[in-house]
Image (cartoon, helix red, strand yellow):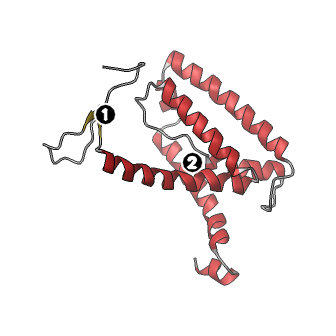
Amino acid sequence: MAMFGFPHWQLKSTSTESGVVAPDERLPFAQTAVMGVQHAVAMFGATVLMPILMGLDPNLSILMSGIGTLLFFFITGGRVPSYLGSSAAFVGVVIAATGFNGQGINPNISIALGGIIACGLVYTVIGLVVMKIGTRWIERLMPPVVTGAVVMAIGLNLAPIAVKNVSASAFDSWMA
């Protein structure tokens, strides 16, 4: 039975030794708590680091991330367990557009926020188009080789920033 349109998850069966959790199953409380802590630790790094790299407020990022995740959860009826956090895709563009030097709050924050709002509107339009006509056109436009290369390029561009931020000296940075 679904309550308010949300699925009713059943406790994972212990009769099977499989580590796979079916879409309609849930883990016992202790395992759920451990997985929740692991998930919070994994999401916290990007949710705090990305705004700092762009000179934005991490507190606002956490708040909006929570609101976005709850909104997504209600829109999908609780069937897609996903956390909506900060994206590294905007870091390079925000730094380039605002000339941010990495110290304190970004003085040209209005440029960054205007661009982020514009991207949000474009994402909304694309989402409505996808809901209307499906995903086949996206798979033809951006095959896995393209999306994989983009994700790799983002990671490779951000790696030197991470090394610089965790290094105490130039020598430590060079050694990393």
Q: Residue at x 16, y 48 (%)?
A: 17
Considering every residue shown, the one lying at the far right of the view is: 107
Drawn side of residue 12 relative to residue 144, left or right: left
Residue under numbered circle 2: 150
* Residue 142 - label: none
Q: Earlier in the sequence, mark 1 or mark 2?
A: 1
Residue 25 picture location, percent across and down: 28, 35
Residue 79 picture location, percent across and down: 40, 29
Q: Residue at x 25, y 37 (%)?
A: 11
Relative depth, front residue between 4 and 122: 4
Measured in 3D between alpha carbons, the distance from the residue under mark 1 to the one under mark 2, in whole angstroms, is: 30 Å
Residue 124 picture location, percent across and down: 63, 26
Drawn side of residue 173 relative to residue 143, left or right: right
Residue under numbered circle 1: 23
Relative depth, front residue between 136 and 176: 176
Q: Is residue 76 above or below residue 154?
A: above
Q: Is residue 35 visible?
A: yes
Q: Is residue 153 visible?
A: no
Residue 89 picture location, percent across and down: 64, 47
Amino acid type, label 1: Pro
Mark 2 secondary-structure assignment: helix
Amino acid type, label 2: Val
Drawn side of residue 31 relative to residue 39, left or right: left
Relative depth, front residue between 27 and 92: 27
